[in-house]
Amino acid sequence: MNSRATARTTAPSARTSTPRTPRTSTPRTPRTTTPRTTTQRTTTQRTTTPRGTARTGTRSTPRPTPRPELRLVPGVTAARPRRRPTSFLRNRRAPFVLLIVALLIGTTLGLLVLNTAIAVDSLKATQLRADNAHRAQEVQRLERQVVSSNTPAEVARAAVAAGLVPAGPAAYLVIEPDGGSVLRGTPEPATAPGHAAGGN
Amino acid sequence: MPNTVRPGAFTSRRVPGSRRSGAGLSVDQRVLRNRWGLVLMITLLVLVVGRLAVLQGVDGAAYANAAEQDRLRTYPIAALRGAVLDRDGNPFAYTVEASRVVADPTLVKDPDRTAGALTTLLDVPEAELSTKLSQAGRYVVLAAQVSPQTTDAIDKLGLPGISFEDDPVRLYPAGTVGGQVVGFVGRDGAGLAGIEQAFQDKLAGTPGHRRVEVGSGGNPIPSGIDESTPAIDGNTVKLTLDQDLQYVTERRLGEACKDGATTRASAVVLDVHTGHVVAMGSCPGYDPGNYSKTDPNLLGNPLVSDVFEPGSVMKAVTLSAALEEGKATPDTLLTVNGHIDAGDRVVTDAHDHQPIEWTVTGILAHSSNVGAIMLAREVGNEKLEQYLRAFGLGSTTGIELPGESAGILQKSADWTASRAANVPIGQGVSVTTLQMASIYQTIANNGVRIEPRIVESVTAPGGKVTAAPAPKSTRVISQATAAQMAYMLEAVVGPGGTAPLGQIEGFRVAGKTGTAQRANPACNCYTGGGYVTTFVGFAPADDPQYVVAVDLERPSSDAEGGQVAAPVFADIMRYALTADGVVPSGTPRPDFVLAGTP
């Protein structure tokens, strides 16, 4: 960023003289080394390395002034990157790419499996919920049956049908503190249902 | 293609001779034309891009939301209304799930065939279904409160355009038993009477809803949005009523109503020690499940809302006041004439007689109006009013039932001479059946009045039980006075009393009859109003457990309370004591001194 900003301030001379394409490259060059480097730069950029390496090279150069001599070795530096990429591509990058591809496929498959599992579970949950509701309804239906046949009126009707009669006065045997017992009330035998019906 | 055009210049596929091809135009004109073309293109581009920006950036959220709403369906989940139970947990009212069958006529493919398939299941005429299914609109209710079994059967048919909504149904399994107390709910599910109305907030619950993402067919997407706010069911209200006793009470009242003279028979049973209402009913009653077919005038609870002049049962208050104020004892002798002057009129006993020496017990046992008025005059109007109010007259009991009447009791300062003579014998003062029972509960409970209550507890759906707040209990008369009153009231049921028919084998019974002139609602006078005959009592007299108050409206008969109301009392009380396992009294009835030795 700094280099670009400085380049802009210095640009006016370059802008008027040169066409656009070089201008974009000029900012990277520091002001001080103007005459020599222009030719060098164009050659190195076009033929040899990606920008990154060029940048680091140019950045490191400006600080120590006696370096220009070392700068004359680009032929060697240009030769190096040519060999390296070919070896990397064939030997060391292939497993990485494969790994990425494998990860991608793995992730996709994993997602698919997870999604399927979720969908299956969701279906199962819906199914179970429906089953549950069914059971609840069944319970409710049975409870309803119990309740409706447990009302006093229904019990009375069933009792009469079974030949039962309402109880008469009950008698109680009350145990006294001394252990004896006392009969309270007068027990009366219930009238047989047939009699009651006849009487009525 | 024309070969006259310069390479790289504007070319046209049009015929070279035509003006629009630009063949005849100068370079400047062409430049101008190109420029306008460019402007036009840019304008169009700006319009399109602008519109896109508006759609995507400004209105985007709204459209996305609308799209989601289109996919989301919200189904209401109805809350189950809480049950109303008796004290043993038997339901008087409860709610079960049911459905409303609705149709979207635009989705129904063959209305006639669909109607034919549904008619027997829904029990709705085929023609009616057919017209409903072919009418305009997208929503039509075919049947309400359909059982789950039926909806399952309909579901299996797979008819398009038919769906179900929650529509719970309120059931009253006991029918008329307890109907007046429990009340009923309207079509919208809101309580309109009785406990259903008074406890609407507690019983209703809070409805929930379910939001589901659906596909084009309206079926839920399995992994889509499915969130539900569950409904919170209503609270269960447990009453103090005993369903069996309620049944017996109502059946006995039903018999009383069939005697040809009784137009209304009411009874209430109170637990002496708690003030709990154990049974409360009247005839004619109604079935809450069928309230719409009942005469609207019968859809109340006359035991708390209807007032009547109680007659002689009020003498218990007059005599309690006289005893408590030290104006008399049960054995105090009074010379009672057959009639007594009371302002502009003369009050007589039931049968006019020569002056007789009666004890206070005798006055109560013979239900002497003259004797009661003599004692009331000893007490004084102001004091008598105090006692009447302390026994709960003129104010509501605070029972958890809607529409309770306070009765009518004028201030003693406003009493005329005839009113002052009428109030001690239960005329010119109006009470509800419940208030009448409450007076005797006070005497039976050693003089401590407990306001009657009918709700025992409220249970939240989670099971948390909230007991009803304890009713107010106040001492009205001393324990000694209460014991003397119990003794004297026992004489009423004994030999020489007015209500030997109120006796129950094995048990000592204390009670009081009443036969009051009934105000004729037609003329607001006593003429043609007939009588209200009453009997209120408690048993066993030596260890009271229950109070039973009975009143019968008999507009066309002059039979007395001891003849018609006392037997009803005895039957209800007998069942209450037997069912509760109350051991018969071990002590014999005391010998009562009713009259002075001549």
Image (cartoon, rainbow, N blue to C red):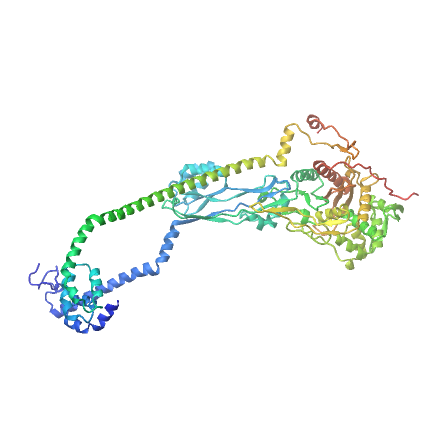
**Which of B529/B592 is in front?**
B592
Q: In which quarter of the view is residue A38 placed?
A: bottom left
In the picture as drawn, the residue positioned furthest to the right comes out as B598
Quarter holding the C terminus of chain B is: top right
- Residue B502 picture location, percent across and down: 77, 39
Image check: B519 left or right of B363? left
**Which of B221/B94 is in front?**
B221
One can see residue B122 in this view: no
Q: Which residue sits at x=77%, y=59%?
A: B414
Rendered position, B494 above or below B466: above
Q: In which quarter of the view is residue B569 placed?
A: top right
Q: Which residue sits at x=19%, y=62%?
A: A54
**Which of B180/B93 is in front?**
B93
- Residue B235 picture location, percent across and down: 57, 47
- Residue B83 picture location, percent across and down: 58, 44
Image check: B202 left or right of B438? left
Quarter holding the N terminus of chain B is: bottom left
One can see residue B237 in this view: yes
**Which of B128/B180 is in front?**
B180
- Residue B380 picture location, percent across and down: 82, 56
Rendered position, B590 above or below A9: above
